[in-house]
Amino acid sequence: MALPAFDDLADGLDSNWTITVGGFTTSGSRLRGNNSGLSSAFWNADTFAEGHSAKATFYTNDSDGSRAGGMVVRLKSTDGGNDYFVYQLSGTGFKTLYRVDNGTRTSIATGSGTTTSGQTFQLDIDADDNMQGWQNGSTTNQPATQDTTYAGGSAGLYLKQTSSAAAELTDWTGDDVGGGGGSTFQPAWAMNSNVVIQ
């Protein structure tokens, strides 16, 4: 196959995906996690460069922050699938970049503003380990930071839910930053005063 990679997620995850933690199911044409904790997976049908991106449309009926979804970069199975970066979103408006170390999340940057169900969110990481979140094609109020902890890996996705409700994703795209399908990375701290960096 060739980048950019695309999956509408309507039929769940096929053999182009490697599930590293948890599991997934579908509701209508949307992907959701099938357990009461975290679920993560990466696209295995292509090899990604050090700089790559993950993008998807996010849906949730979350009212307390317990159901969340996210775009993942630098995820791989060689470390048990528990080490990666994720741009996590919830219906309560949380926009957080986490570094996940052996399954434990550490906040490394936060954004602000409203998280609206049905909008497109994206996480880019470049070859120099700079990360940038996007919302509907804009970096305004989106988190950005640099973290050199993890290298390699692939673009993927992440869902976190309770037993009663779920966050959902559709129309996932993975690409190299500045290559492959031509995703463009612009560090927000160099051009946008509205980005929040921790």
Image (cartoon, rainbow, N blue to C red):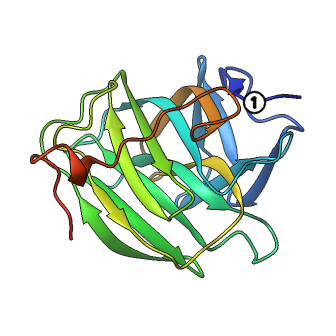
Give the total number of marks visible in the rendering: 1
Q: Residue 95's x, y, as percent?
A: 27, 50
Which residue does the image show at 51% across and 30% down from the upper left? 56
Query: Quadrant location of the C terminus?
Result: bottom left
Q: Residue 34's x, y, as percent?
A: 63, 47
Q: Residues within 10 Å of mark 1 (few under 14, many from 20)?
A: some
| Residue 166 visible within the image | no
Which residue does the image show at 23% across and 51% down from the upper left? 190
Residue 47 shown left or right of residue 88 in the figure = right
Which residue does the image show at 25% across and 28% down from the upper left? 116
Tell me the kind of residue under disc 1. Answer: Leu
| Residue 113 visible within the image | yes
Q: Residue 168's x, y, as percent?
A: 49, 34
Query: Quadrant location of the N terminus?
Result: top right
Q: Nearer the viewer, residue 15 or 130?
A: 130
List the residue tagged with mark 1: 3
Residue 114 shown left or right of residue 117 in the figure = left
Q: Residue 150's x, y, as percent?
A: 60, 74
Position of residue 135 relative to residue 156, above or below, is above
Please identify the quarter of the rendering in which residue 121 is found.
Answer: top left
Callout 1 secondary element: loop
Position of residue 169 relative to residue 19, above or below, is above
Which residue does the image show at 27% across and 30% down from the upper left? 138
